[in-house]
Image: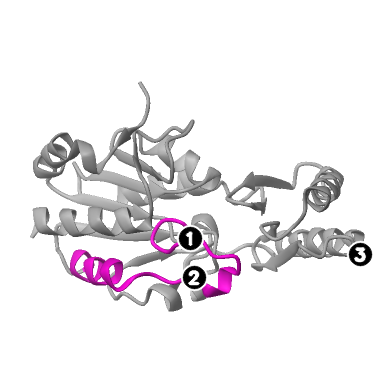
Amino acid sequence: MGMLPLLDNWRAVARRLDEASFIALFLDFDGTLAPLQEDPRAAGMSRTARAALMRLAANPGVRVCIISGRRLADLRERVGVPGVRYLGVHGSDTPEMAFSPAVLRIVAQARGAVASRLNGHGRGIQIEDKGLAFSVHYRRASPPEITHARKILDQVVEEFAGALWVVPGERVWEVLPREIRGKGPATRRQWHLAPAGALPIYIGNDGTDEAAFGALAEGLTARVGPARQTRARYFLRSPAEVARFLERLEELRS
């Protein structure tokens, strides 16, 4: 069965939300809560989305987690909603998680190798240091630059013999150490910390979210953007529709 537009199927969705004793709500940030930007530093939420999140985070029957490829401090600053559980770098950048110096050294070495081998041949390529991981953004790159950068990235990852893996996102490659297993295990772990019988909801927009759609398939899953091949059950057309969903959820649970 193909994806269904979530808001157009509200009666069936609302029935599941009504029946749930508790809601475990998981949200991606870029492309989900905030519209995608050419420059990721320009991303921000609408006032509508923030207001709905504030009310949901204060609801004792809802636990809100925001999980993103961004670093924890950046995510907290951009969202700024108290009572939310923030999970940076695909669920691995949290106060209680720590990684060995050897892991961090491998990530830094690989990031440096990619940067040095690009050597000015990828002006549209941007490498983002996340400490625990790094991203290679190609939103502004030409097709030859993208092909060249991917070839270099694959060579570098192969040289580290299984210590790293790549998750494709929206015009970005996320390079993670194998110790970071991605959004699927991270969200399932958080769901199991919620009260028994909690209904998980996951909303995201790109390839980094697919593992979470699969991990939380018992719940409500929605991919943001046009209908496409995905493990999500529903789709929301834009971050504006995500904000409308959050408003409806808040009204239903208040």
Compute the Cα span from label 3 to label 1. 29 Å
Asked whether the beta carbons under mark 1 and mark 2 sit within 8 Å of each other, the answer is yes
Q: Is residue 194 visible?
A: no
Neighbour tally class for label 1: few under 14, some 14-19, many 20 plus, Cα within 10 Å:
many
Q: Which amino acid does label 2 sit on?
A: Ala
**Mark carried by residue 43:** 2
Magenta range = 30-57
Left or right: residue 66 compared with residue 100: left
User: Mark 3 is on which residue type?
Assistant: Asn
List the residue tagged with mark 3: 119
Q: Which residue is drawn at 78% across and 62% down?
A: 111
Q: Does the magenta stretch include residue 219?
A: no
Quarter holding the N terminus is top left
Please identify the quarter of the rendering in which residue 136 is found.
bottom right
| The one of 48 and 202 positioned closer to us in this rendering | 48
- The location of residue 40, given as percent across then percent down, is 57, 68
Write down the residue under mark 1.
30
Give me the residue at 16% from left, 50% from top: 22
Instruction: Find residue 47 and report its horizontal and vertical position in percent.
Output: 29, 73
**Mark toward the start of the polypeptide (1 vs 2):** 1
